[in-house]
Amino acid sequence: MKRLIAPILIIFVIALQFVSCEGLDENYATNPNLKLSFSADTLSFDTVFTDIGSATHSFMIYNHNDKPLLISNILLASGGESGFRINVDGRKGNSFNDIRIGANDSLYVLAEVTVNPNKENGPLLVSDSVLFNVNGIKQVVRLEAYGQDVNLLKGGITLLHDTTFNAEKPYLIYDSLVIAQGATLHIAPGSVFYMHNKANIINYGTIVANGSLESPIIIRGDRLDFILNDVLPYDRTPSQWGGIYFRKESFNNEMNYMIVRNGNTGLTFEPSSTEQPKLKMHNSQITNMGKNLLSAFNCHIEIDNSELSNAGEGVANLIGGKYSFIHCTIVNYMALTPRNGSYPCLTISNNANNQTFPLEATFANCVIDGSFSSGKTDFQGEMLLSINESTTFNYLFNHCVIKSKGSANEHYTDVIFTDVSPSYRLTGGEKNKYCFDFRPDSATTIGVGKADLAISKSYPTDRYGVNRLTNNTPSIGAYEFVEQKK
C-alpha cells in the first residue's frame, strides 16, 4: 500500500496544477476598464557616458483589480534601437507576450541603457517607451536618459610625453592614468575627470592644472546617480574611486582652482626631497575621502586659500619635510563613514618606523577643526604633534583657530584655542542633503576678523574671490565672512 502513495500523490499534484491553470485561464478579466498601474510614469536615468552601460533602474507593474489580467504584450517602442534594454519578471528581451499578473499582484521591470557617441560636447537626451497591451487598451511608461560623450581612457593609459587635456569633453578614466617621469600633463580650465571605481592617477612626472574661479578643474567619481533618492547622490559619498599618487620622482606640480572629491586616499606623496617643491596648490578644494585625505612624507608642499575637508582617517598627515599652509580651512566632519579615532584632523611628525626626518611647518591664518573634542591635554584634540628630539622639529601656528586646549608659547602666535567649533553654513546630514559648506555663517563666528592682516595682504581674495581687505579685518581660514542672502 505504501508503494502506491507516491504515484498517487504525483498524479494528484499534476491534476491540481492542470485544474488550477485551466481555472486561471478562464478567469482572466476581459473588461477594458480594468487597467494596470505603475510605480512611475517616467523612468529617468542620470547622465550616462557613451559606450558605458548605465546602472539598472526599475519600476513596478501593479494589478490592483480583484481578477488576474493577461498582458497581451510588453515591448520596447524602439525595438531595442534606442540603447535601452528591459527585463520583465526575470526575462530579458525587447518584446514579451502573454504575461500573467495575478489579482492584487505586481511584477518588476528592470531597465538599463547604453548611449552611442554623438560627437557632441553637450548632453544628448535619449528616450524610449515601454508599451503594454491589456484587453486592447495600450498603456505607456516612458524611459529617458541623458548621454554624455567622453574621452574614454581605458586599459591603463601612460602619458610618455608632454600632453594637454582640454575642456571640450569630460575624461572618463576607467582604470588608471599614469604620467611618466619627464612628462608634463597640462590641464585646461573647466576640465572634468570622471574616475571609475578604483581608478587612480599615478604621477611620476608633473601635473600643471590651472583652473579658474569661473572654470575650476574637477576630479570626481563617475557615478551620477543616487544612493538615496533625491537626498544622497554618489557624488557626496566617499571612496568612489582610488586616489592621486605622487611618486618620489615627481616635482613642480601645480594645482590652481582644482576640486578633487570623493576618492579613497586623496593626495598621497611618496618620500621625496625638499630641495624643490613637490606641490604648490592655490584656491582649491580636496574633500570627502574614505581614508587619508592628504598624506606627505618628507616633501616640500605649499598650500594657500584652500579647503581640505572630511576624511575617514586624517585630513593632513605630514611626516618630515617642509610645509606652508596659509589661509586654509582644514576640517573633518566626516559622517558617511566612521572617523578613525586614531587620526585627528592634522598630524605633524618628524619620525616614522623608527626613523627621523627633519620637519619645518608653518600654518598662518588657518582653521583646524573637526567633530572630535578638544581633548583633555594641551595641544591635542584635532591636532597631534609627534616629536622626536633627536632631529629638527620647527613649527609655527600664527593667527590660527585650533580645536584644542593650549596657550601661547614660541610656537603659537595669537592662536585661538577652542573647545567649541566655529559655526559653518552647512555641516552635512540628511537635512542638508549631506552637503557641507565651511564658510563662516555669522559675524560672531570664531576667527571672523581675526586673521593677520599683514599676511592677508598677500592673499587679498578668498577661495571664492571675495575681497578680504574691505575693512582690513580679514577672517581666518580659506573663506571670508559674507552675509548669507536669505
Image (tube, rainbow, N blue to C red):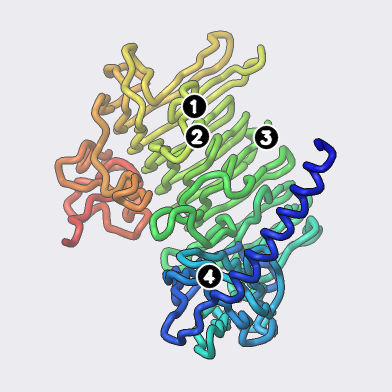
Q: Residue at x 56, y 85 (%)?
A: 133
Element type where label 1 sits in the image: loop
Task: Work out whether mark 4 precedes mark 1 in sequence or the reverse, and give the earlier one.
Answer: 4
- The residue singled out by tag 3 in the image is 270
Q: What whole-number distance in Å separates the C-alpha atoms at marks 2 and 3?
A: 20 Å
Image side of residue 143 versus residue 433, left or right = right
- Quarter location, residue 325: top left
Task: Work out whether mark 2 precedes mark 1 in sequence or the reverse, and give the earlier one.
Answer: 2
Q: How many marks?
A: 4
**Viewport quadrant of the N terminus:** top right
Task: Work out whether mark 4 precedes mark 2 in sequence or the reverse, and give the earlier one.
Answer: 4
- The residue singled out by tag 2 in the image is 312
Q: Is residue 480 above or below residue 376?
A: below
Most foreground residue, 394 or 131? 131
Image side of residue 93 versus residue 99, left or right = right
Q: Is residue 303 above or below residue 111?
A: above
Q: Residue at x 65, y 78 (%)?
A: 98
Q: Which residue type does callout 4 highlight?
A: Phe
**Label at residue 340:** 1
Residue 338 appears at what percent x and percent y?
46, 32
**Viewport quadrant of the C terminus:** bottom left
Residue 166 appears at what percent x and percent y?
62, 71
